[in-house]
Amino acid sequence: MNSQKWAILAVIFISLFSIASAARLGRTTELTPESVARIAATVSEGEKSLYLITLEDGIDVSLLSYFGKIEYEFKFSNGASVWITEDAANLLKNANAIVKSIEKDQTIQIEEPASNNQKMPKEGESLYVTSMIKLGGQWNLTEDGINAEAAWNDFGVDGTGVKIAIVDSGVNYNHTLLAGRYLGGNDFCDSTGTLCAGIPDDEDPMDELGHGTHLASAMLANGGPTGLEGIAPNAQYYVAKVTDSTGFWTSNSYLSGLEWAIEQDVNIIYIGFGSTTWDVPINSAMEQ
C-alpha cells in the first residue's frame, strides 16, 4: 500500500476515533473527572482558540478544564469560555447530551467615527458631535425631538435616583459634564490592540477611544461651562469597558461586561453597539 493510501486511512481513523470519543462523552450517564479526563486525553494537541461553551443544566462547568484553560465562567448560563483546540471543539460539538452550544469567540470592531467630532474631546470642550448642536443651541430634547424638556419641567423627571450602566469603550468620567455622578466601573479588555481576554486587567474603565464618552454625554451631560445637557442630567452611572483602545471587542469581553453590569442592579443598561448575531450565553444574559 502506497504512502498516499496510508495517509487517507490515517485521516479516516482519526476522524472515526474523534466521533467515537464524542459519542462516548455524550452517552456517559455519570460524568466524573476521571471519565472526562480519559476522553480529553484523546484530543490531539494544537493551537488553542477561545470558545464560548454552554452545558446542559446540572453538568459541572469545571469539567471543561480538562480540555483547556477556563477563561471566564458565565453567571447567567451554565458554561464558560475555554481555550481549546479545534479537535476538542469538534469533539464537544458532537457531545449533544451534555453540550448545549459551542461557538468560537468573535472579534468585532466598532464602526469608525463619521467625523473627527466623535474623537475624544479635550477638557472643557463639548462632548456633542456637530449634529447635536443647532445654531449654537442643543436640539432633540425639545418638543421637535424627544421632548425631554417636558419630562423635566412638567413631571420633574431628570434622572434623579436613576442608575445607568454603560457597556461600551469606557467613559471619561473625569470630564466636566460627566463628573460627580460616576459610581464605579471595570475594564474587561486590555488596551494593547490584542484580543480581549474578558478578565479585567484593572478596574479603570477610562475611555481611550471616545465612543463611550460621546454616547454617555447624550444621556448624562449636566450643563457645565457649555450649558449643554443630556436626557437625564442628574442620573448616576457605572461603566463596563469592553473594547480595546482601537475599538475591537469580542463576544467574551462583551458578555463579561454585560453580566457585570447586570450585577450592579441598575435601572438601565445602555449598550452602545451590537451585532447581527449573538452567542447563546449573551442571549441568556440579555434575558435577565
Image: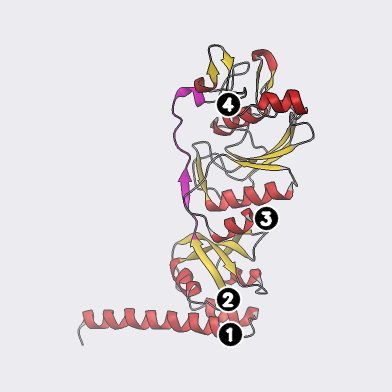
Q: Nearer the viewer, residue 219 or 204?
A: 219
Q: Quadrant of the N terminus?
A: bottom left
* Amino acid type shown at disc 1: Thr
Point out residue 82 in the picture as x, y percentages from the top left corner. Answer: 56, 62
* Amino acid type shown at disc 2: Ile
Sequence-first disc among 2 and 4: 2
- From the image, tell me which residue sits under label 2: 98
SS at badge 1: loop
Question: In the rendered structure, are the residues bearing label 1 and label 4 in contact, judged by CB atoms less than 8 Å apart?
Answer: no
- From the image, tell me which residue sits under label 3: 288
SS at badge 2: loop
Point out residue 34 in the picture as x, y percentages from the top left corner. Answer: 63, 81
SS at badge 4: loop
Question: In the rendered structure, are the residues bearing label 3 and label 2 in contact, judged by CB atoms less than 8 Å apart?
Answer: no
Q: Nearer the viewer, residue 109 or 195?
A: 109
Question: In the rendered structure, are the residues bearing label 2 and label 1 in contact, judged by CB atoms less than 8 Å apart?
Answer: yes
The label shown at residue 145 is 4
- From the image, tell me which residue sits under label 1: 28
